[in-house]
Amino acid sequence: MMEKPDLLSFTREQLRDYAVSIGEKPYRGDQIFSFLSRGVRYEDMTSLSLALREKLEAETEFRLPTVLTKKRSRDGLTEKYLLSLIDGECVECVLMRHDYGTSLCISSQVGCRMGCRFCASTLAGKVRDLYPSEMLGQIIAAGNDSGERIDKLVLMGIGEPLDNYDNVVKFLRILNDKDGIGLGLRNVSLSTCGIVPGIEKLAGEGLPVTLSVSLHAYRDDVRRKIMPIAKKYPLDELLAACRLYFDRTGRRVSFEYTLIAGENDSREDAKGLCRLLREKMGVASHVNLIPLNRVEETGFSAPAPEAAERFAAILRSEGQNATVRRSMGADVDAACGQLRRSLQNKGKEL
Ligand code: SAH
């Protein structure tokens, strides 16, 4: 339980109310909101009176993560951060420099309880949810450290965003505020393993984020073998929710498909995937193929190097829009949860 108010998790309206509640004018709330979004420490908020700065310091909490370690890929394009939260837990985020701009992949929980069999983030279960401030804090910390402006954000790091629904939605609203970080939500992708009620609810929030759904199989039996969530929400229900998301938001849904050797990478799988998406989604979908980043403990193997392109070619020949995710930063353990995992394996000596 948190005792002190966590101001970076406040919307601008909440900060105005807070300012009034401590005897200040509402516009002070706007000022504080904009300072916090840039990671300005209380002592440096010099347009506030010293008395107010001291009060904020004493009575509130500023949950800004700090950089514990960072690793840069050999090509210099990827920066992987391990960040420490104020209770000593840690999460990862990954900054990637593309020709179209800089993207940042952030975490939504400390650990994950979804149990996908091939994923490093979930091996030790979930520790706790992240607060909005700790998701914003990853953008602030990586932005300040790298000096880069973040153009695109993906919620594809550690954790299942729709298993931390309220904090994630609040985070998106604060992120979008033009007096704060001000990132347009069309530049944000949220990735889910397929929590159907969460997708349905998100469709009604009026937040135009791109929904990415981790499909990984076109058949329920194959999907259940690699993703426990598939036992709860079969493909029929999942794709109906995706269709609803498209109908409500007008945003084309993106499907992630991690290729795992011998599990879901055959020609038949590619054809089955096309059939399924055509039937359930019409033209409203995009497939993003991800060659498995092998995680030692899981026992699954990556497909042959050319397998992803071959799979993509079949999808395209069937008229299905598809891309292969460029494997960036494999030399910095950039796959989900690998850096935090390697820290855990070292016995947390840091
Ligand atoms: N919980 C969310 C977001 C986190 S993971 C979700 O499941 O979508 C982001 C994507 O990476 C998901 O599609 C996930 O299945 C995939 N992924 C996880 N571990 C992977 C690995 N070792 N290799 C390739 N893809 C992986």
Image (tube, rainbow, N blue to C red):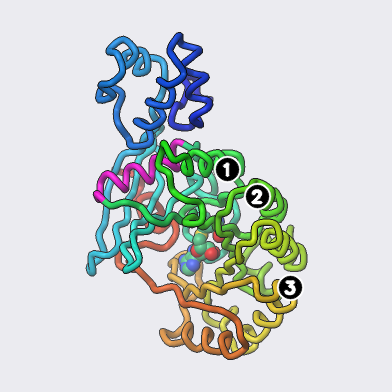
Which numbered disc covers residue 280? Answer: 3
- Judge from the rendering whether residue 72 lies leftward or rightward of residue 224; answer left or right: left
Residue located at (34% from left, 44% from top): 83
Quadrant hosting residue 234: bottom right
Which numbered disc covers residue 285? Answer: none
Q: Is residue 54 magenta?
A: no
Residue located at (27% from left, 44% from top): 144
* Towards the viewer: 70 or 96: 96
* Towards the viewer: 260 or 51: 51
Quadrant hosting residue 25: top left
Circle 1 sits on which residue? 169
Counting from the top left corner in percent of width and height, residue 226 is at: 61, 68
Residue located at (25% from left, 25% from top): 44
| Numbered disc 1: secondary structure | helix
Q: Amino acid at mark 2?
A: Leu
Circle 2 sits on which residue? 202
Mark closer to the chain start, 1 or 3: 1
Rounded to the nearest angstrom, the CA distance separating label 2 from label 1 is 8 Å
Q: Main secondary structure of the magenta part?
A: helix
Counting from the top left corner in percent of width and height, residue 322 is at: 53, 78
Residue 217 higher or lower than 190, as above or below: below
Residue located at (64% from left, 61% from top): 250
Residues shaded magenta: 133-147
